[in-house]
Amino acid sequence: MKGTELNYGDLEGFFKGLLESKAVDCLIMPRRVGNSVSYMLVRDKDKITAPESAIFAPSFGVNAANIVKGWLIDEKVGIVAKPCETRAAIELIKLTQLKEDSVLLITVDCAGTYANEVYAANYADIGDQVDSAKIKELAGKEISIRGACTICENRLADVGDIAIAQANGEKAVVAGLTDKGVEALTAAGLSLEEKGLEREAEKEQIAADAKANLEALPKIDSEAALEEFLRDCIVCKNCRDVCPVCYCKDCFFDQPLGNPAGGDLLNLAETRGAVAVPANQLLYHLTRVYHVCTTCVACGACEDACPKDIPLTRYYPVITKKVQEIFEYVPGKDVKEPLPFTTYEDDELEECLK
Amino acid sequence: MGIAVIGGGIAGITAALDLADAGYKVYLIEKNAELGGKVAELAECETGISPQVVKIENHPNIELMLSSEVEGLSGSAGDFKLKVSGKEIGVESVVLTPGYDVYDEIAKGYGYGSPDVVTSLDFEGMLRTATAGDTRELVRPSDGKPVKKIGFIKCVGSRCKENEICSTACCYYTAKEAWEVKERYPNTDVYIFYMDIRTFGKDEELVADLKGKYGVKYIRSRVPEVIPEEDGTLTVKYEDLEKGTVERLDLDMVVLAVGLLPSKTIKKLAEITGVKTDAYGYIETNLTSPMETSVRGILAGGAATAPMKVRESVTQANGAALKAAMFSERTEMIPGQEERKYIDVGEEPKIGVFISGREGEIAGSMDLSAVAEHVNQLRGVAVVNSETNTLKGTMEAVESGIVDQGLNRIVIAGYTPRAYEDMFRDTCAKAGLNPYLLEMVNLREQCAWVHGAEEATGAAMSQMTMAVERARYLEPIPIESYPVTPKALVVGGGVAGMIAALDVADAGYDVYLAEKEPELGGKLREVTELQSGEKASGVLKDLVDKVNSNEKITVYTNAAVEDVRGRAGAFRAKVITGEGVDEEIDFGAAVLATGAIEAVPEGYFGYGQDKKVVTQSEFAKMLEGTVDANTIVMVQDGTPGDGVHPKYKSIEVVSNALRAKKLKPDLNVFVLYQDVKTYGKWEVLYKEARENGVTFLRYDEERPPELKDGIVSVYDVIFNDEIQMKPDLVVLSTRMLPAEENEKLSKMFMIPLKNGFFLEAQERPKLVFTPVDTANEGVFICGSAVYPAMIDESIAMGSAAAARACVLLAKNFLETPGIVSVVDEDLCAGCGVCVELCPVEAIELVDVPVAAVTYSVMTVTGGTKKVARVGEGCMGCGSCASYCPSDAMSLNNFKDKQLFAQLDFA
């Protein structure tokens, strides 16, 4: 892998170089505003200041892929984001909701994130970046990372075009993961050398911990349990709106059949005697989980967005991971890998036929 | 005038329908009071054959003459006078399909007479009754006790003194019956006593499954005796060939796989019509003209020409029909070819519900009056009719309901949709109602059969309500008609392809014949002598000359077919040849006859290195000269590698052995084998070979023969000893590989392959009624491209494919399918997953214009967006609609609205 080690202080120059060299026309990247970190879309390089204080920040607000979803433009946008966000962007490329040639995906190592409001409120304790030891220590103070992050197996920057990996002592390894990435790095003025960035042992440890945490989650193991779990849902569909891989132009649940009102609803009440309103609470979540079952990157944006604090991580990522395991598919791992629905093998799903 | 079809079994039914559907006047003459013949007695065939019977009964071009006897025939081809039960009819040609009789002089020793010893046909009846009821166990006829052990005894009344030929069908039907027993009653132990297992192709796989997965015990022994014991046990005595001991096996039930005999009516028909019969009493035909009798204008098909299975019978019947049509003129209208106008259905649903089944299985398991009463209460139901009992009656009621009572949604219950949906759609269309305003409820298989007597009535009510609710939301689907191109494309110029081309051309249509080699002829070019002793070169030359001189046939050699588009009746493709031809051709039907290739048994017995080891076809060429050997060992089985064993494998072995013996009577010929599969009349060649001193040695499957230092050793299971031979020549039987181009053709014509060979439309471990039809309407398959068989079968299949193609080409127009996917472009996000999902590549992603938006800093390059478009070729599978998350893609007649309405009452 071709890359180079940069001091934190050099990162600003690197990002500016990407814009200056026209490797990208604009960048979507985190920026710090006081205690908070949020995304900005930047075209003027001078607006980039001290990126090292923002790009590693363990704060999750929106999934960056959701910002660019459906941007079928020819201008080239660089996206500096966490692995789950890059993976969502890659799924969107497969679904032609994003042009592969118009994005440069720059992925930053992630140790786990706090909901952005938690992060801002506890900035004094959390700081600009964390590692697993720090996360444990903060957990002792009841400052906990998001549920989705506890079961995340893919936290290291190994997807997209460019990886920004944390190295010892306020240093970062910047490496090209694709030809496009290497080209951009070179254009930005970095001189590259061979860099090992496999980190297999670390990845295995992360995956093992994530699996154990997933196992430890309370199970929704019956229809009754599911109904109970979703009971407080008000079908506001926020979980859909923040989902980076929900990509319909007009959601079925905004159409008359999925979102019955007035006469349609009266008809249903006539048929069934009584109908729960808002209607289709269970159907909405069952349909949605089916729609995202192969593409869900388990970023947990849905849980963050739920105004009723339903712990949706126990539902969406848990179910979708199972489906993905059946298809041996990791969403966003490789832009060339076809969506499981679109392939067919003679001997597939035999285990499900029994 | 018209064409007479004599015999109303499956062959007669097939021939009559092909002819009538192509616009010929048909007289179908059956001596019994009902149609269906033997097939109607088989376990699963009631539903299989009754739609065809109904079609015949209602066909405007068929005059059905039941309980009728043929009494006389005069005149000649093109102008026959046939006397039938005192009535005279004039016909141009005659198709004889009198079928077969079951061997009925069963030897006393089999214990026949005990109620628990039944013939295979009786057993089919038992299985059929068990299907209809909810019997959970197979019970003995005598005392109703469960059958724990059942034995099938093969070759009862065949391959014996009284009936020396092989009845062919028994090996398969026994396997099928054993399979049904194991599928339904897995705890029943099944034993099959046999001499040789003579199954072929896919049926061979069924036998392998039975032996493996299902644990059926195949015991090689001719059972001399079944002894009914006092306690009801049936003791079978048999010889264990491997141990050389006589064994006893106690069974609860025994099924005798009885042989087939020529129908007794054949003799009489032969006397009346003058057609010759063969030594066994079958109608005489020829290896190279398998449907032609000795009298011009009189054709024959099915088990009247030789013992055979349904698949082969139907094939011959298709072919015989077309040959008969050559003497006749089309005089009749083809049903469905009249112009239709549909009424405007308006907003308000007026639903008519028709429930049939006052008698039989449905009425027996539910309270139909209560169901009708319940349906009558439902909103929008204008009419409930539960009085009709016959298909014809129901159809008439539906028609009058639409015309007289203004019904605009129809719900039918009591008929199997798979078999009757098309007919009822047609009924609606005839009455002026768009055919997609029909909904069917399967009260038989999906209610009566699966719900016990207590639950069936309630379940039926629910199913009826669901159907009514769905019907409420059914929408008319626009139907367009398009003209049929009256031309056919035949791919492959071997025997089957040439026959298909000639037959289609003789029927009056233009044919494109594309052969990949520089010359026509296919595998026949390699053959020296047919099994009948006829020289192959003469047959070949005759065929090639006929094809080349036929003005209606355009022959392309060194040719490949590319870029197939369109659908039945209106296909288009490219023909590209080595000579630089690159032509667009239009055709209404396609026949795929790509043949098969002999696999090289490289390395087997040192083939390839050792010059003394040759294949049977190489040996046949050597037999054109003199035999330069004293001892020959033929290894019939065990050839490793890809491909399938051709059906003629044993016949090739036996006839080559006999040819060799004739050339050199003192030659030693040893045949090492597992099963000698000389089916049908070829059994006599096997006998002749043994009588002429050919030695057959059956070896243990676990201990295959070996060739080492010029010595072949084989462990013979009869002698229980190793035998060594020093042959001058080892002759190997070869497997057959599918043609290389099948893979590509399969994709272009959308026909599935199995082991590389084309698969017919009906793939179930049961009976094949449409052996040359495929999953893609308008595309037909024949010859070794389906399964490598002998020349007579290839010819019959070639004619059958031609016949089926001509039924289609006879039509002036066809209608576009209604149940296809449609796109709502406003909803489509252009993700393109549907494009990938479509199995027939009917969807593409296209750019459509949208307004481009310009901002001050940059231009958003827009102007277009991607949306999915459904093109021709959509088969309505619904894969795309089931994926599409936003419902932009949906399937006509299966709209969410319709399904939701139905589900609400589930």
Image (spheres, coloured by chain):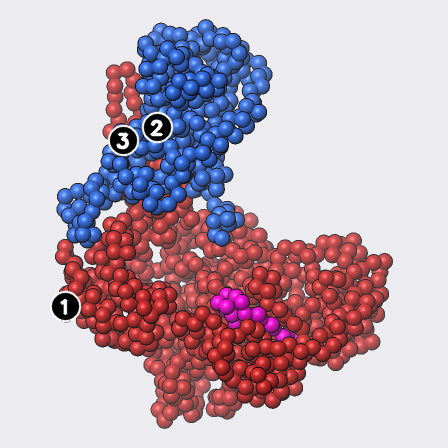
Chain colours: A blue, B red
- Whether labels 2 and 1 share one chain: no
**Do tag 2 and tag 1 residues touch (Cβ < 8 Å)?**
no
The answer for how far apart the CA atoms under marks 3 and 1 are is 55 Å
Q: Amino acid at mark 1?
A: Gln
A162 in magenta: no
Spot occupied by residue B841 in the image (x, y as percentages of width and height) = 41, 46
Q: How many marks?
A: 3
Q: Quadrant of the C terminus of chain B?
A: bottom left
Q: Residue at x 33, y 81 (%)?
A: B63
Crowdedness near tag 1: few (<14), some (14–19) or many (≥20) residues, C-alpha within 10 Å:
some
Q: Nearer the viewer, residue B41 or B463?
A: B463
Tag 2 residue? A301
Task: Identify which residue is drawn at 30% across, 59% down.
Answer: B815
Q: Position of residue A354 (x, y in %)?
A: 49, 53
Q: Is residue A298 visible?
A: yes
Whole-percent x and y of residue A235? 25, 36
- Image position of B892 with respect to A167: above or below: below
Asked if residue B544 lies left or right of residue B857, the reply is right
- Camera-side residue of B412 and B465: B465
From this viewpoint, is residue B292 visible?
no
Q: Which mark is residue B405?
A: 1
Q: Which residue is mark 3?
A: A308
Range drawn in magenta: B177-195
Task: For mark 1, give the secondary structure.
Answer: helix
Amino acid bearing label 2: Ala
Disc 2/disc 3 C-alpha distance (Å): 14 Å
Relative to B554, say whether A308 is above or below.
above
Of residues B183 and B667, the one nearer the viewer is B183
Secondary structure found at label 2: helix
Query: B840 above or below A51?
Result: below
Q: Residue furthest bottom?
A: B86
